[in-house]
Image (cartoon, grey):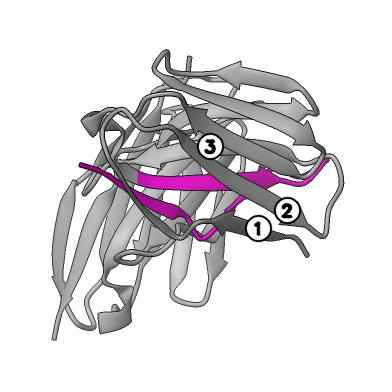
């Protein structure tokens, strides 16, 4: 089955700086890669996703890049704000199921 | 757009008691449905998924079971709860023909 590894497990950044989270996957057949943000005590919320036929996607301060050859994808958050503090999960899928990374706790320091 | 309901929102149960958590989905037909568990400070563990009525796939052998008696209803059950069953239980749905899974609000279960 698919195995997704996510790094780092914790990330502390100064407000206004950028944050980068990296994930690798094992199954070359995976073709869909979503990112979820989970605030304390809440449900995970989809923030951006990318499909294997696209190398990069951007939505305001958030961007995701995908390298199919190396089987890794990354989340980039620019101009971080206090409300970006949360746990972020990457995932990979090629059928009915999503395989999640272990999560990255992002703390934005004011 | 689809809406996912879960109840109860919170539950405190003694060890050895039964469990029934319910998930219902509005705004879509024939969704794929999923049960996840999240232990405190941990990641998302897929427990069960269903692609249709009466069709259940189990990902992790344990004392939990799932059923899908109706197209948009997914139930998670246990006959006897263990302390290790404590956690945040999330139902997710994926619309037919789409790839994205959306999560319900979750049920927080504490087994004492």
| Contact, mark 3 vs mark 2 (Cβ under 8 Å) | no
Q: Which residue bears the numbered disc 1?
A: B4
Q: Which residue bears the numbered disc 3?
A: B35
Q: Earlier in the sequence, mark 1 or mark 3?
A: 1
The relative height of residue A86 versus residue B68 in the rendered view (above or below) is below
- Subunit bearing disc 3: B
Q: Which residues, given as a range, are shown in magenta?
A: B88-112
| Mark 2 secondary-structure assignment | strand
Give the quadrant of residue A18.
Answer: bottom left
Classed neighbour count for the residue bearing mark 3: other residues with Cα under 10 Å, few (<14), some (14–19), many (≥20): many
Question: Is A32 a magenta residue?
Answer: no
Q: Earlier in the sequence, mark 2 or mark 1?
A: 1
Q: Earlier in the sequence, mark 3 or mark 2?
A: 2
Question: Is B107 a magenta residue?
Answer: yes
Please indicate, yes or no, whether residue A96 appears anywhere in the rendered image: no
The percent coordinates of residue B99 (x first, y second) are 69, 42
Residue occupying the point 36% across, 68% down? A77
Classed neighbour count for the residue bearing mark 2: other residues with Cα under 10 Å, few (<14), some (14–19), many (≥20): many
- Subunit bearing disc 1: B
Q: Assign the magenta stretch its main secondary structure.
A: strand
Give the quadrant of residue B1.
Answer: bottom right
């Amino acid at each position: 089955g698919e195995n997704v590894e996510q790094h780092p497990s914790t990330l502390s950044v100064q407000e206004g700086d950028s944050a980068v989270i990296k994930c690798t996957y094992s199954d070359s057949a995976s073709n869909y890669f979503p990112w979820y943000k989970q605030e304390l005590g809440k449900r995970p919320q989809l923030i951006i996703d990318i499909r294997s036929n696209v190398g990069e996607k951007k939505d305001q301060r958030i961007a995701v890049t995908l390298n199919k050859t190396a089987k890794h994808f990354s989340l980039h958050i620019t101009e971080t704000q206090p409300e970006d503090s949360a746990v972020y999960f990457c995932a990979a899928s090629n059928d009915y199921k999503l395989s999640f990374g272990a999560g990255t706790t992002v703390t934005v320091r004011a | 757009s689809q809406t996912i309901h879960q109840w109860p929102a919170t539950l405190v149960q003694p060890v050895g008691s039964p469990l029934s958590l319910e998930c219902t989905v509005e705004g879509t037909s024939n969704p794929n449905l999923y049960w996840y568990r999240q232990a405190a400070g941990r990641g998302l563990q897929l427990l069960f998924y269903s692609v249709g009525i009466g069709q259940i796939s189990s990902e992790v052998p344990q004392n939990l079971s799932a059923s899908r008696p109706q197209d948009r209803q997914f139930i998670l059950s246990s006959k006897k709860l263990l302390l290790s069953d404590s956690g945040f239980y999330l139902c997710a749905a994926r619309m037919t023909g789409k790839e994205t899974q959306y999560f319900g609000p979750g049920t927080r279960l504490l087994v004492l």
